Image: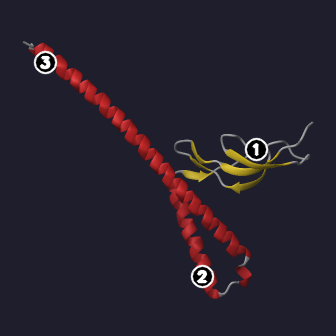
Amino acid sequence: MTTEKELLRQKIIEFQQTIAELKLTLAQKEELFDKNTKDSFLSLLDIMDAFEALENNLETKKDSLDKTAKMLGKNIISIHRKLVRHVQSASIIPLTFPRNKATRELCKIIETREDPELENETILEIVKKGYINTRDGIVLRKAEVITVLNDNF
C-alpha cells in the first residue's frame, strides 16, 4: 500500500518529467520558428535584389523610356522602398565594411584579382549585398564580394 508521501513523490516526478518534455518541445518550436523566420527574410532579400536590379536597369535606360514605362519605374521604386522599410523594421540592414576588408564571417569571396596597389582581402566589388539582423547580431546572408589577392611568391 502506497502512502500519501509516496503518492506525492510520484506526482512530483511526473510533473518534473512533464515540465522537461514541455521545455524541450518549446525549444524545438522556437528553433523551427527562428528557421522559418530566417528563411522568409532570405526570400525577401532575394526579392529586394530583383527590385534593385530592375531599378538599375531602368536608371540606365531612363532617357529612352516613354511615359508609361517611367510610371512603371516609379511604381517599382515605390514597392522596393516599402520592402526595404519592412526589412529594416525587423532590424535587418545591409552589411557595411568600414575598412573595406572582407572577413569570413561577413563575406563569401566569389572572385579574386591582383592589384599591387591594394592589400589582400580589400573589397573591389560587392556583387551581392549581405544582411545582418542587428537585434540578434546574426548574419542572415553573407555578402558576395570580389577581393584583392596578390601573388607574393
Identified by mark 1, the residue type is Lys
For image coordinates 73% across by 82% down, the residue present is 63
Residue 71 tag number: 2
In terms of secondary structure, where does tag 1 sit? loop
Q: Nearer the viewer, mark 3 or mark 2?
A: 3
Q: Residue at x 57, y 66 (%)?
A: 81
Q: Secondary structure at mark 3?
A: helix
Mark 2 or mark 3, which is nearer the start of the sequence?
3
Q: Is residue 111 above or below residue 28?
A: below
So how many labels did they put on this image?
A: 3
**From the viewer's perspective, is residue 82 above or below residue 153?**
below
Answer few, some or many: residues within 10 Å of disc 2's Cα (few below 14, many 20 plus, some between 14 and 19). few
C-alpha separation, residue under disc 3 versus residue under disc 1: 66 Å
Q: Position of residue 29 (x, y in %)?
A: 38, 42
Kindly identify the amino acid type of the residue bearing the numbered disc 3.
Leu
Please tell me which of labels 3 and 1 falls first in the chain. 3
Mark 3 to mark 2 CA distance (whole Å): 76 Å
Quadrant (top left/top right/bottom left/bottom right) for the C terminus:
top right
